[in-house]
Amino acid sequence: MDQKELTALKNKATELRIRAVDMIWKAQSGHPGGSLSVADFMAACYFRYMNVDPKNPRWADRDRFVLSKGHVCPAQYAALAMKGFFPMEVLDTLRKEGSPLQGHPSMTKCPGIDISTGSLGQGFACAVGMALAAKLDGKDYRVFSAVGDGECNEGEIWEACGTAYKYKLDNLIVFVDWNNLQLDGTCEEIMPPVNLAKKFEAFGFEVYEIDGNDMAQICDAMDKALAAKNGLPKCIVGKTVKGKGVSYMENQCGWHGTAPNDEQYKQAMEELNALYIKEEA
Amino acid sequence: METKKIATRDGFGEAIVELGKENRDILVVDIDIGKSCKTQAFRKELPEQYLNVGIAEQNGAGVAAGLATCGKIPYVVTYAAFGSMRICEMIRQEIAYPKLNVKIACSHGGVTPANDGASHQAIEDMGILRTIPNMTVIMPADFYAAKALVKAAAYYDGPVYLRFTRDAVPVIYDENATFEIGKAKQLRDGKDVAILANGDTVRLALEAADLLAQKGIQARVLDVHTIKPLDIEAVNACINEIGRIVTVEDHNILNGLGSAVAEVIAEAGKGKMKRIGIQDQFGQSAPYERLLAMNGITAENIAAQAEALLH
C-alpha cells in the first residue's frame, strides 16, 4: 500500500470517528469510548478489505462483519453510511423510535448488519458459524469480527475459538480491541486479561500483536492474515486507546457509555477535524 | 394387544437422516451427546453435514445462528435442560430476535431421563421458551409424530424448539398420520370433558378417556403438540362446546401447556379447568412411571379430575 492510500484510509477513520461522535451527541445516548478505539480497524475493513455490495446487502458471497461488541455500533453505522448502505441522514436517527439504527445492531432492521448483536460474548460464535458455512459451501468469502477485551471475560468467546480451530477457519479474522477499560474500571481491576495474545495463540489462532490505532500496522497484519491460507484462524490483538482522538475521552472509563454535551461536542469536533491529513501535492 | 413402545428421540434420529438426504443445507450441530440424542446415523451417512462443537452449548447456538444467516438449516442437538436453559439467552438474542432458521432439537424432555435425576429432567423448558417472541415450541407424542414434526420444522420459517423423550413411549399414530405445526390434533371426540395433552402424556389422556367411557363420560382428546403458537381455535371450541378442560403435560404446571390454555380460558371468561403436570417441584432418580405418579400424572388421576369437573 502506498502512502497516498494509507493517508486516504486514515482520513476515512477520522471521518468515521467524527460521524460516530456526531450521532451519539445527537442521540444524547450511546458508547463513544469503544466506538473510537475500534474505528481504525473498522475503517480498514470497510474501506480496504471487505468485499461488499451496498446495493445488495444480502449478497450471498459477500464478506461478513460481526461486531461482537455490539454497543460500539455507531462506528459500524458510520462505516455503512459512508459505504452507501443507507443515506447519511439516517445516522441522525440513532436510538430513536422506528430507526434502523438500534442501540445495538439489528440485522432485520439495518442493511449491512450481518447478525444482531449486543449481548456480549455471543457475536463471535456467530462469526465462526458464518466462516464455517463458507467452508462447507466451498466459498471464499471472509468473516471479520471485533471483540472487546472486557468481552473476553465471557466463556463463549473461548468456546467459539475451539470451533474455529477445529474446522480450520482461516477465513476468519478476529480483532481484539484491547483498550484496557471495561464498564466498571480497568481490565486489570475488573478481570485481569493476563495476555490475550497468548490466550488466543493457545487456542490455536495465528496471532498478530499490533498498535490497534495505527493504520499501517493494522493493514500489515491484515495483509499477512489474509495471505496465510494455512488452516489457522487469525487473531489481531490491537492495543488501542478508548476514546481515541478526543483528548478528554482518551483512557477515561467514564466515557464508556456517555454522550457529550454541546460544549464537549464542539471540542471533540475541533480535535477530530484536526486529525485530517491533507493530501500531498 | 401389546402396544409398541419407542422413544421419540428415535423418531428424530430417523427423520433427520431423511431430511439431510433431501436437503443438503440441513445440518446437525452436536454438543457431544449425539449418541444419546440419536444423531449417529446422520453422522455416519452425512459426514459433510455433521458438526460437533464439543461440550459448549452456548457456542453451538451461536455457530448455528451464523450458519443460518448463510442459508443453512442447522439442528442444534442436545438435552432439553441444556437446549433451553443453558442457552436461553443465546436463543433469545442470536436466534429468536433475528428470527433465524435454527432448530433446537432436544432429547430428554420432561422427566423421561428418569434415572438421571433432577439435573437432567427438563420441566421448565417449554414454558421458558414460550415467552420468547418468534419462538415455536413443540413436543410430539410418539415416534411417528416426532418424525413428522421434525420434518415440518425444517420447512417452517424461523426458530423451532422440539422436545423428545429419552425413554420409550407407546406408539399411538401410524406412519401416515399428518401434523401441522400450530394445529392441535383431535384423537377422540366427546361432549362432556376435553383432555388436552402433549408429548408422552397424550397416551395417558387416551387411557383416561377409556376409563371415563366406562362410566358413560365422553371425553374429547386433543394432542396439543405445539404449545406456541397455541391452537387457540381448538381451545375455544373446547370452551364453547364443552366448557370443561383438563390439561396434562410432562412439564411444570407453571407456564407450559396448562398455563397457555388457562390464558385462553381466562380471557374467554368462561369454562372450568384443571391442570395436571409436574407440581412445581424437582424430580429425583426414580422409574419414569413413578415420577409421573408422584405428580399425579396418571390415567386414573386424569379421569378423576375430569369427572370432578362435571360436578
Image (tube, rainbow, N blue to C red):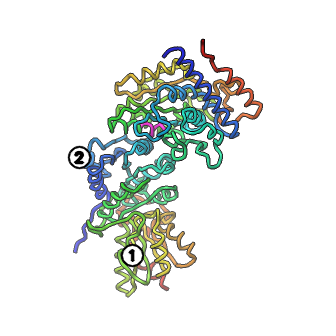
| Residue B302 visible within the image | yes
Disc 1 versus disc 2: nearer the observer: 2
Compared with residue B25, is residue A261 higher up or lower down, i.e. above or below? above
Q: Which mark is residue B221?
A: 1
Q: Amino acid at mark 2?
A: Glu
The three-letter code of the residue at mark 1 reads: Val
Q: Secondary structure at mark 2?
A: helix
Segment colored magenta: A122-128
| Residue count near mark 1 (Cα–Cα under 10 Å), binned few <14, some 14–19, many ≥20 | many
**Residue B154 on image: x %, y %:** 36, 54
Q: CA distance from mark 1 to mark 2?
A: 39 Å
Q: Is residue B172 above or below residue A217?
A: below
Label 2: chain letter:
B
Residue pointed to by mark 2 = B45
**Sequence order check, earlier mark of 1 and 2:** 2
Task: Say whether residue A123 is magenta.
Answer: yes
Label 1: chain letter: B
Q: Quadrant of residue A255?
A: top right
Tell me the quarter of the image containing the C terminus of chain A: top right
**Looking at the image, which is closer to me, B253 or B28?**
B28
Residue found at x 41% / y 45%: B68
**Direction front: furthest residue:** A281
Residue A30 placement (x, y as % from top left): 65, 38
In terms of image quadrants, where is residue A62?
top left
| B284 or A274, nearer to the observer | A274
* Residue positioned 32% across, 52% down in the render: B37
Examine the rendered structure and indicate whether residue B200 appears above or below residue B30. Answer: below
Residue A209, percent across and down? 49, 20
Q: Are marks 1 and 2 in contact (CB under 8 Å)?
A: no
